[in-house]
Amino acid sequence: MEPRPTAPRIPPLAPADRSPSAQSLLEGVVVAGSEANIFTTLVRAEGLTRRWLPFGGRLLNGKLPARDRELLILRTAWNCRAEYEWAQHVGLARAAGLNDVEIARVPSSQDPDWGERDQVLLDAADELHASWCVSADTWQALTDRYDEQQLIELPMLVGHYHMVAMTLNTLGVALDDGLVGFPDVPD
């Protein structure tokens, strides 16, 4: 596999270069802060970003429990090798109830210390990543816990974060100051 960009291919839009509407759009961002590299880069496609933000915001405040959502996002970030996505969501995962030991275990989805509830989420994220579909067994386990709206939201969440990962990786969006990338994982 070809290495990822080591520098931004499209740099964040500097404050002096922002239109009033771009600045206004950025001021409305509450997750990760309006100056986060993801937003100051994507605002270069202002119309697209204006429409994307509400969808992403809806998923961050959706029907899935916050802890479950963040576990799915972290596993997706790991699967896609999206270090920026990972780094941004570690703090959100902590706030949602995942502890540092659990976060450090996310790369090892078959770790025997995962309980059944968490394991099925990791399996769903892995299956969606590998085959673009949740298996029958995993689906059954999910239907035992989630309602229809949550079941619809789950693959949309994982799919959305695949899209974000591809964008971040391709554009080479750099980690913001203070963010920590992937954990060291033994081979």
Image (cartoon, rainbow, N blue to C red):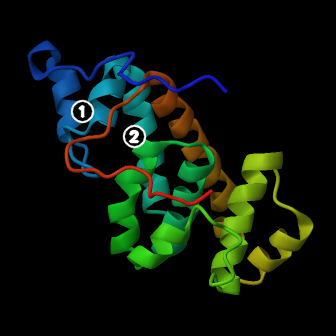
**Kind of residue sitting beneath label 2:** Leu
Given the current orientation, which residue lies at the most extreme right position? 136
In the rendering, at what x and y percent does residue 171 appear? 44, 23
The residues tagged by marks 1 and 2 sit, at their Cα atoms, a distance apart of 9 Å
User: In the image, what residue occupies the spot 33% across and 73% down?
Assistant: 95
Q: Is residue 91 something that shows in the picture?
A: yes
Q: Quadrant of residue 14?
A: top left
Is mark 1 in CB contact (under 8 Å) with mark 2? yes
Count neighbours of disc 2 (C-alpha within 10 A) and say few if under 14, some if 14 to 19, many if 20 or more.
some
Asked whether 150 or 41 is in front, the reply is 41
Q: Position of residue 18 (x, y in %)?
A: 17, 18
Hey, which residue is sitting farthest left in the picture? 16
Horizontal and vertical percent for residue 111?
66, 75
Which residue in the protein does label 1 denote?
25
> Where is mark 2, residue-wise?
53
> Along the line of sight, which residue is nearer the eye, 182 or 155?
182
Left or right: 48, with 38 as reference point: right
Determine whether the residue tagged by mark 1 lies in a helix, strand or loop: helix
Can residue 147 be seen in this snapshot? no
Residue 93, position in %: x, y? 41, 68
| In this view, 34 is above or below 2 | below
The image quarter in which residue 175 lies: top left
Quadrant housing the N terminus:
top right
- Local secondary structure at mark 2: helix
* Left or right side of 78 for 94: left
Q: Residue at x 55, y 72 (%)?
A: 68
Mark sitting earlier along the chain (1/2): 1
Q: Quadrant of the C terminus?
A: bottom right
The disc labelled 1 sits on which kind of residue?
A: Leu
Quarter of the rendering containing residue 112: bottom right
Query: How busy is the neighbourhood of tag 1: few (under 14 within 10 Å), some, or many (20 plus)?
Result: some
